[in-house]
Image (cartoon, rainbow, N blue to C red):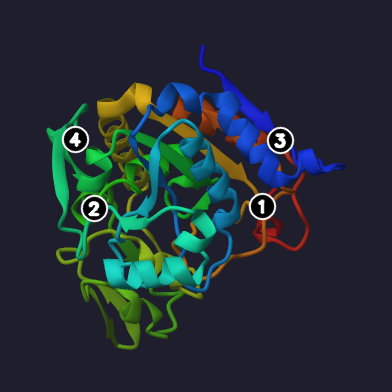
Amino acid sequence: MAEVFFADLRARKRQDSMTAKVRRLVDRAGIAQVVGEKDLVAVKVHFGERGGDAYVSPVFVRQVVDAVKAQGGNPFVTDTNTLYSGSRSNAVDHLTTAVEHGFDFAVLGCPVLIADGLRSGSVVDLPGVGKYFPQVHAAADLVASDALVVVSHFKGHEMAGFGGAVKNLAMGCAPASGKRDQHALRPKVHRDRCVGCGACVEVCPVHAISLVEERALINREVCIGCGECMTVCPQSAIGTGNPEDLREFVERLAEYATALAAPRREKTLYVNFVLRVTPDCDCVPWSDAPLVPDQGILASRDPVALDQACFDLVRNAPALPGTLLRKWH
């Protein structure tokens, strides 16, 4: 049975500070079994899209870096470029955003790299594990690393339902070509709701959307399924065209996660921060009000057990007033 370790948020003395708890949690969850002397260790994070502020604080990530160093490892903090347009679609803009959000050597105490190169072309193919992919595309620098610590912000997600360790592993460790593999869905415009504002047209990275008779129209032959149009539509006029698309999306995501985890199954640790549980992914350029109170920080060697524990905490937590949950029970 997989073990999941938990740190609450109470602190009445210095040794119970959040930073101290992160360090103790990582140590207790088995960083010593993951990191060896002189290992090059990738600390996989999400730097957050410019405009958002719900990503895991670099102050907490520093505690993970220091724990790696204490084991003799040589850490670097990293992420991969995005499929959609925004502030992280190439390494130059991505690193600029990372520094703006506090992810730099002065704060982290280690280098910051973009694992799939300047334009997401630094790719290594790995064997697939399921029905969709005979092979998967992985960011080359993550494959080349000796060990991996996946640090995730647990939150909602427009298509996956929630995002945690599994999604950060599957989507977050893949280059743009791997992200495209996983985005099986093709959005559909509900024209009765569309007001023709053009927000989706501006954000589409492949120019698959146009305004026809003052309503958005998606060319499904060109669309790559990144879902960015759904997140920016102010009228919620864009959704998935077929409910089965979402099932296929999460199945593809799970296959990618399994394949990307396989090369270093015994050399990976996962840490989830169940803080500021926003309804949307950190990929959107804003952070909506958290849905539930902050729950704590969890860690495990098993990403599925970890995400299940985080999901259970959120599901059983009381809803906060004044959030998107006012629409649902």
* Horizontal side, residue 163 vs residue 11: left or right: left
Mark closer to the chain start, 4 or 1: 4
CA separation in Å, label 4 and label 2? 17 Å
Task: From the image, state whether disc 2 or disc 1 is nearer to you.
Answer: 2
For marks 1 and 3 on the same chain, the one whose residue lies earlier in the sequence: 3
**Front in this rendered view, residue 41 or 186:** 41
**Quick one: SS at disc 2?**
loop
Q: Residue at x 39, y 72 (%)?
A: 96
Please name the amino acid that badge 3 sits on: Asn
Circle nearer the N terminus (4, 2): 4
**Disc 2 vs disc 3: Cβ atoms closer than 8 Å?**
no
Q: Which residue is mark 3?
A: 316
**Residues under labels 2 and 3: Cα distance?**
35 Å
Q: For the residue marked with disc 4, what is the amino acid?
A: Tyr
Mark 4, Cα crowd under 10 Å, few <14 / some 14-19 / many 20+, is some
Residue that lies at the very extreme toward the top in this rendered image: 1
In what element is the residue under mark 1?
Answer: loop
| Residue 312 visible in the picture | no
Quarter residue 105 falls in? bottom left
Name the residue carrying label 4.
132
Is residue 132 depicted above or below 275 in this figure? above
Q: Which residue is mark 2?
A: 175
Residue that badge 1 annotates: 328
Q: Amino acid at mark 2?
A: Pro
Q: Is residue 159 above or below residue 314?
A: below
Labels 2 and 1: the sequence-earlier one: 2
What separation in Å lies between label 2 and label 1 (alpha carbons)?
Answer: 35 Å
